[in-house]
Amino acid sequence: MKFDNNMEELDAIGDNHVGTSTDTPMRADAFDISDDQKIETIKADVRHIMETLGLDLTDDSLKGTPNRVAKMFVKEIFGGLNPNKKPTASTFDNKYKYGEMLVEKNITVYSTCEHHLLPIVGRAHVAYISKGNVVGLSKMNRIVDFYAKRPQVQERLTIQIVKELQAVLGTEDVACIIDAKHLCVNSRGIRDIESSTVTAEFGGKFKEKDTRREFIEYIKLETQF
Ligand SMILES: Nc1nc2c(ncn2[C@@H]2O[C@H](COP(=O)(O)OP(=O)(O)OP(=O)(O)O)[C@@H](O)[C@H]2O)c(=O)[nH]1
Ligand SMILES: [Zn+2]
């Protein structure tokens, strides 16, 4: 699908603040080529990298790798760059007048560090206080997954999740905390396998100390089933 690069369509990739540093930096012609074309180009690029490394691409085990990696980039781990994959998060009327915060915790995060293209693996905890609308629980997991499926820095991922939920729910009262391991820190470079990174974004009422603390207390609760 071809997209003209105008404000409305950039909004469609989920970045509601076009031109600000919370957007995923995209080329102006990002949507001029189809996913299938991207796969073909990346396939040749991966082949080139592997050959440069001295690998024999006629080997049975290696010959499918360029295609496999290209498909994985476009359709899976960077699938969140495609605006068509953005989850539709339908909201419902809060007819039961539930007025407390709702926390969706321990959401699995698989993302990719945009500096090294290595995995980021962790958990996101998301909370909101309804201003009249409620959202299906799974939609919060889906929104986290959509933005995670991009080259990311964890700070931007955290903010993008909050901004999207604020837009969907029509309230500023949304928060997100992410605790994740960056393989670029754990498996190479400094090679510190123990360290993880915590980021947080608190909107509206979550800027208040007590609300923020309540959210953190719920996250700490051990879930027993
Ligand atoms: N703030 C932030 N930094 C990140 C994130 N993911 C990776 N980084 C850091 O990005 C930095 C890139 O720094 P460079 O010095 O250019 O890269 P490098 O030479 O590979 O650095 P080392 O990882 O220290 O070996 C590293 O310090 C990474 O740890 C992230 O989500 N947020
Ligand atoms: Zn990295």
Image: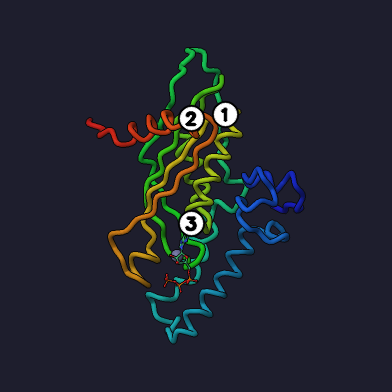
Of mark 2 and mark 1, the one earlier in the sequence is 2
In front of the other: 138 or 216: 216
Number of other residues with Cα within 10 Å of mark 2, as a class: few under 14, some 14 to 19, many 20 or more: many
Figure quadrant, ligand 2: bottom left
Q: Which mark is residue 169?
A: 1
Seen at 54% across and 31% down, the residue is 204
As measured in the structure, the alpha-carbon distance from the residue carrying label 3 to the one carrying label 1 is 27 Å
Identify the amino acid type marked 2: Tyr
Seen at 49% across and 46% down, the residue is 158
2 and 1 marks in contact (CB < 8 Å):
yes
As measured in the structure, the alpha-carbon distance from the residue carrying label 2 to the one carrying label 1 is 9 Å
Can you say whether 61 is above or below 35 in the image? below
Name the mark nearer the viewer: 3 or 1: 1
Q: Is mark 1 within 8 Å of ligand 1?
A: no
What residue is pinned by disc 2? 128
In front of the other: 32 or 136: 136
Quarter where residue 159 is shown = top right
Of mark 3 and mark 1, the one earlier in the sequence is 3
Can you say whether 96 is above or below 221 in the image? above
The number of numbered badges drawn on the structure is 3
As drawn, the residue found furthest toward the front would be 209
As drawn, the residue found furthest toward the left would be 224
As measured in the structure, the alpha-carbon distance from the residue carrying label 3 to the one carrying label 2 is 27 Å
Can you say whether 205 is above or below 21 in the image? above
Seen at 37% across and 72% down, the residue is 189
Q: Which mark is residue 77?
A: 3
Q: Is residue 184 left or right of residue 201?
A: left
Residue 2 spot, x, y in % from top left? 72, 53
Render colour scheme: rainbow
In front of the other: 123 or 37: 123
